[in-house]
Image (tube, rainbow, N blue to C red):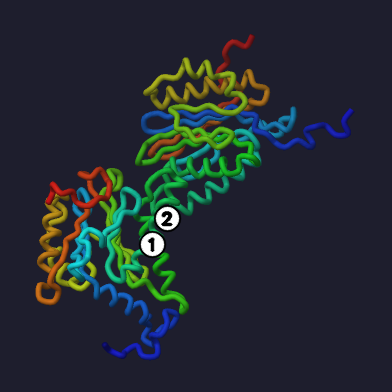
Amino acid sequence: MSSLGTGYDLSASQFSPDGRVFQVEYAIKAVENSSTAIGLRCKDGVVFGVEKLVQSKLHQSSANRRIFHIDRHIGMVVSGLLPDARKVLDFARGEAQAYRRKFDDGIPLKLLAERVALTMHGYTLYSHVRPFGCSVILSAYSEHTGPEMYMVDPSGVSWGYHGCAMGKAKQQAKTELEKVKLSSITCEQLVKEVAKIIYVVHDEVKDRDFLLELSWVCAASSGRHELVPQKVY
Amino acid sequence: MEAFPEWTTKAHALGTSIMAVQFDGGVVLGADSRTSTGSYVANRVTDKIAEVSSHVYCCRSGSAADTQAITGVVKYELEMLELELGAKAEVTQAAHMFRKLCFDYREQMSAGIIVAGWDKRNGGQVYCIPLGGMLVKQPFSIGGSGSTYIYGYCDSAFKEGMTRDACEQFVVNALSLAMSRDGSSGGVIRLVTIDKDGVARRTLTGKEIPTFYEG
């Protein structure tokens, strides 16, 4: 590990002389240490795929989720420190429900992504807290807005994407997903592409076993975010 | 004999006739223009149709002060929401904001509001929020003290699928009948028509207001 940040990396409330906040950069490194997750948006929906590394044969395979639901129409996949991700998830669910309480309708994804980003950014301003060590990708589909996908990273930046990747094989995954013709593909076909990419980027040598977790939110699922049904497999 | 006439101390009330009708592609809102303080007409050219956002308006009835305050808050909240969303607000979002205020403060408020407008997602919509803070979506809605005299007329004259012009005529006729029977309603008829292209305001005065059987 480089010691570039020495002296200027003790808290998020410090800038380095060359204008960087090292705590945030270290948080981003934490995300890069976790296993790969990707999201791809096609014309009628969004598909998530996660490479879940099996830490131990004793783990119950279905219990350790990386993909979560926020309200009925929004999905979230996380990478990085999972307990940190849990906090972000709880916040997002709270915002979604508060919106539903007030407006009797699902929260628009753009609004939720901005609020999640605002919160995550808030933790990068002070010395008495640390930034979240996780990145999240949010997805939604509705007939009115079409498919949407946003990724929020530990610095609190939120961008909309057609395709994005996070985790250890992120660079390789990005190369693979650029090859997919997103404008002409349907969600059913996209599921296969996403699964293929996860298998391709998985490092057989360093990490042995893994489980594939897939989810989609699309026209076929009527705008509900759900784990891909067995029949599509 | 009282020391002062009641109109010097009574709060302004919008004894009113208001209504809104939905058509394919937009809505028509209508209102009378009388604000009374007891039996004194404090304002005979009131504008009871308030802008809440570029494509959402509301008709106010009940306490003038209460409805102005509520409308002010919703207008502000909606503008903040539009900035956050980067898109125009939806009519249902405005209606729910009104509902929240009218319900949460129901004991202190006396406000009957009709919210109507147009948005890309659901087209023209009319939402009625009577005293107490219930929210109900309707094809057309009437409110205010004058509305009690025109329920029969509206139920018989309303047809599904009316054109924009037919809706405007329906509103004008109904309000004219209400204004002629209700002492707390009168003055001019204000009309606001909203569709995807924007808002058109009209005022009918004097001879332009149709007359029916005047007894």
Q: Is residue B24 left or right of residue A170?
A: right
* Mark 2 residue element: helix
**Residue at horizontal 38 percent and vertical 83 percent from the top:** A19
Q: Residue at x 22, y 60 (%)?
A: A39
Give the side of residue B72 with respect to residue A47, left or right: right
Q: Nearer the viewer, residue B172 or A193?
A: A193
Give the mark nearer the N terminus: 1 vs 2: 2
Above or below: residue A118 compared with residue B160: below
B38 lies left or right of A46: right
Q: Circle 1 — which element? A: helix
Q: CA distance from mark 1 to mark 2?
A: 9 Å
Q: Residue at x 36, y 82 (%)?
A: A22
Judging from the image, mark 2 belongs to the subunit labelled A
Q: In the rendered image, which quarter is residue B106 located in?
A: top right
Q: Position of residue A114 (x, y in %)?
A: 38, 60
Q: Residue furthest front?
A: A58
Task: Say if B180 sits above or below A16 in the image.
Answer: above
Residue toward you, A3 or A57: A57
Please name the residue that numbered disc 1 is placed on: A116
Pointer 2: what residue? A95
